[in-house]
Structures are given as C-alpha cells and as structure tokens.
Amino acid sequence: MNLVHDSASLQAQIALWQAAGKRWALVPTMGNLHAGHLGLVQQAQRQVDHIVVSIFVNPLQFGEGEDFATYPRSLTADCDALRGVGCDLVFCPAVTDIYPTTGAMTKLQAHAALAARFEGESRPGHFDGVVTVVAKLFNLVRPHLAVFGQKDYQQWRIVQAMVSDLNWPIQLLKAPIARDDDGLALSSRNQYLNLEQRQLAPRLYQTLQLLADTLHATKDPLKYWPELQSNAVTELLMAGFNKVDYLVWVEQHTLAPLKDPQQASVLLVAARLDKTRLLDNLEL
Ligand code: AMP
C-alpha cells in the first residue's frame, strides 16, 4: 500500500493505473477509521481494480466552535487497518495542499433544498464545505466509483445531487451503516462519549426501530406521526439525551416531509449527549 501526502504523487500513481486500463474507486474519509470505513473499502473492492482512501480533516466543513482542532487523528493506525483490507493508495494531504490560498477561493454551493434543513440547520455552511472538498477530491483522483456511507444520509443525498447536477461521470455507491453489537452506529465521534453516555447511545437506534415497527403496523401512519414523533423525542430526553436536534420522517429522494406513506422514506435523527452529536437513520 502506498501512502502519499501531496497531489502530485497521487496523480503520478493514478496515471499509471489509467495507462494500464484499470478502474479505481475513491473512499473519502476524515480518518480515525473504524469498521464502518473499512466496510466502504470492501464494498468498493467488488467493483474496481484499485482503491484510493483519502484521509483529510476538511477545515471548510467545520463551523466555529466545532471540533476541527481536536478531531481524532490516527494516521498510523488508519494505515495499518487499510493495509489489512487491501487498500492500494492512501491520500493524506496537508491542508495547504488542498487549499493553497487562505481566504478567497472558488467554492461550491450544496443543493439548497437538500442542504437547508437538519444538519444544515445545526451546522451552517457545513455542506458547502463538504461538496467543495469532494469536488476537489473527485478532480484529483478522477475515480470511476466513489463510496459514501448511509450513516450520513443527508450528505449522501447531497453528493448524489452534486454528481448529477454537475454531470460527473462517476458511479456512486451507498454503503450500509456499520453498527456496534448494541446497535450504535459506528462513528469516530463515539470516542467522545463517557461510559454512561455510551450506554445510553444505542437508544437512538432503538427509537428508530420502534418507530419503524409502529409506522409499519399503523393503518394511517401519517396521521399518527406527530404524536409518535413527539413521544419518541420526550422519551429520548427523559432517558438522558440533552437535546434532540431533529427526528423526522422524510421522503428518501428529496428529504422533504412525507406526503404519501407508500413513498420510499427514511427516519433521520440527530441528538446530543452533552457536546457529542450522534446521527442515525433508518430507511423504511
Ligand atoms: P467520516 O470519516 O466520518 O467523514 O466518514 C467517511 C465516510 O464513511 C462517509 O461516507 C461516512 O458516511 C462513512 N461512514 C462513517 N461511519 C459509518 C458507518 N458507521 N457505517 C457506514 N459508513 C460510515
């Protein structure tokens, strides 16, 4: 496995694959890898010859007061793990390599309707930062396939919209959520949880499962949704969550409120345990 820190070395390797007629995938990450990230690599391996994993904590997608400076960084362990699953190339650039100019630069704007609510509401500018760095990574790596996790559902939809809106000839793959044995979605931020919070955290997924079961079993689920939603939020707060940023039942494609329960839908939730925000979702 090759580890490169600058885009020139990255592109030299890509040129070799291109000359050999190979196909490759990009798995963008911010590092501190867990089994969920490795699952993305394994999904991609079924479809292409080579895998590039980028590890880049992107300052553009962090807001003021967020954890950019303290975001866990663990390059040596990440590389060991990636070697173990047969990754070919790790691209871990410096911030100055991706953003050589400080201040003014060309940025992308995420799909306004998809980005306005949920994470966009709690984290203004976050998705513009995400699409800008993903666009740059796409241009540097020029992958045939790019893999994103269902874990960040809104991000997945926004990247999908960007690829379609900007006519990028890149196939996208959505990888299922990898979870701990107790159901908690794996996340680099789980390590911020203390023991008590860690025990509470799986409640989030349990809540989604319970809601999904109830919605399936209810004759007119849209009518009862406001009450079910409000009860679920109250229960999370009573259990010890400090805040539920959102708990919504939306249409999968537009992320707009559901009008017809027969449509493909998804439950999205974000809740806080002290300073740690946990995200989860469940497709119905
Ligand atoms: P991150 O490093 O947190 O930016 O995540 C990089 C990629 O891994 C994103 O596409 C995430 O959606 C995905 N990812 C993170 N956690 C999980 C998980 N538990 N299951 C599946 N994919 C995940």
Image (cartoon, rainbow, N blue to C red):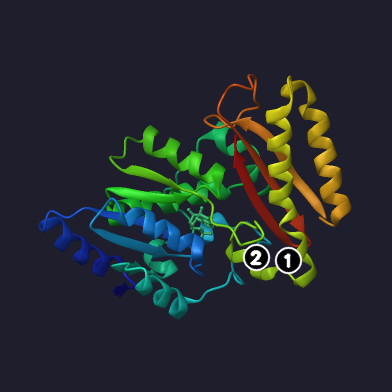
Type of amino acid under label 1: Arg
- What percent of the width, then of the height, locates residue 210? 73, 41
Asked if labels 1 and 2 touch by Cβ distance under 8 angstroms, the answer is yes
Secondary element at tag 1: helix
**Cβ(mark 2) to ligand 1 < 8 Å?**
no
The disc label shown at residue 190, or none = 2
Rendering quarter of residue 170: top left
> Is residue 147 positioned above or below 217 on the image?
below
Q: Where is mark 1, residue-wise?
A: 198
- What percent of the width, then of the height, locates residue 270? 69, 48
Residue furthest to the bottom: 76
**Residue 121 visible in the snapshot:** no
Real-space Cα distance between discs 2 and 1?
Answer: 8 Å
Secondary element at tag 2: helix
- Please tell me which residue is depicted at 72% across the width and 68% down the height of the picture: 193
- Please tell me which residue is depicted at 46% across the width and 54% down the height of the picture: 104
Type of amino acid under label 2: Asn
Dot 1, crowdedness within 10 Å: few (<14), some or many (≥20)?
some
Dot 2, crowdedness within 10 Å: few (<14), some or many (≥20)?
some
- Please tell me which residue is depicted at 44% across the width and 67% down the height of the picture: 95
The disc label shown at residue 92, or none = none
**Residue 40 visible in the snapshot:** yes
First in sequence: mark 2 or mark 1?
A: 2
